[in-house]
Amino acid sequence: MQSEHDIVVTVRTEFLPEQSVSEDDRFVFAYHITITNCGTEAAKLLSRHWVITNGNEKVQEVKGAGVIGEYPYLAPGESYDYSSGTVLDTVVGVMHGSYRFLSDDGTEFDAPISPFTLAVPNQVH
């Protein structure tokens, strides 16, 4: 049965060598997000919460309003795409988190973002 609040988040990552400086332990990654409302109720994205863990298990949390300054409103079946990025001081890391939504029925709910890996190509053994 289809749920009224069913947000699906897919992620594609990309290492950005032109912005990275390995000698300074600066590794820049882009992540490309697609948020799809698979539920039966329209909803507006209110905020984001990211947990970023580098290769040394140092954790950084990022919380904020909207995504890239926007608050997408998704009717059932609609998707929203955006890209953002992060900088790590290790060649590999992991991100996960959630988006907070407000549905048209007045319910606030979290849409989980499953863990995904950020890795410099050919560095992970």
Image: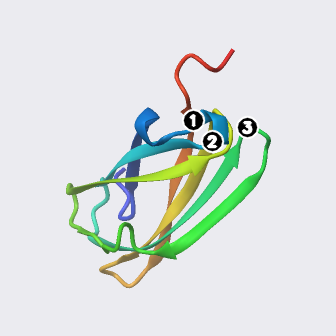
Q: Is residue 121 above or below residue 104?
A: above
Mark 1 and mark 2: span between their CA atoms?
Answer: 5 Å
Q: Which residue is mark 1?
A: 117
Element type at mark 3? loop
Amino acid type, callout 3: Gly
Q: Is residue 17 above or below residue 110?
A: above
Q: Can residue 13 be spotted in the picture?
A: no
Q: Which residue is mark 3?
A: 55
Mark 3 and mark 2: span between their CA atoms?
Answer: 8 Å
Residue 60: horizontal and vertical position, in percent? Answer: 69, 59
Q: Are marks 1 and 3 in contact (CB under 8 Å)?
A: no
Residue pushed farthest front?
A: 23
Q: Are marks 1 and 2 in contact (CB under 8 Å)?
A: yes
Of labels 1 and 3, earlier in sequence is 3
**Which label sits in the foreground, 3 or 2?**
3
Task: Please indicate whether residue 122 sits to the left or right of residue 111 in the image.
Answer: right
Amino acid type, callout 2: Val
Please identify the quarter of the rendering in which residue 44 is found: bottom left
Residue 5: horizontal and vertical position, in percent? Answer: 39, 64
Element type at mark 1? strand
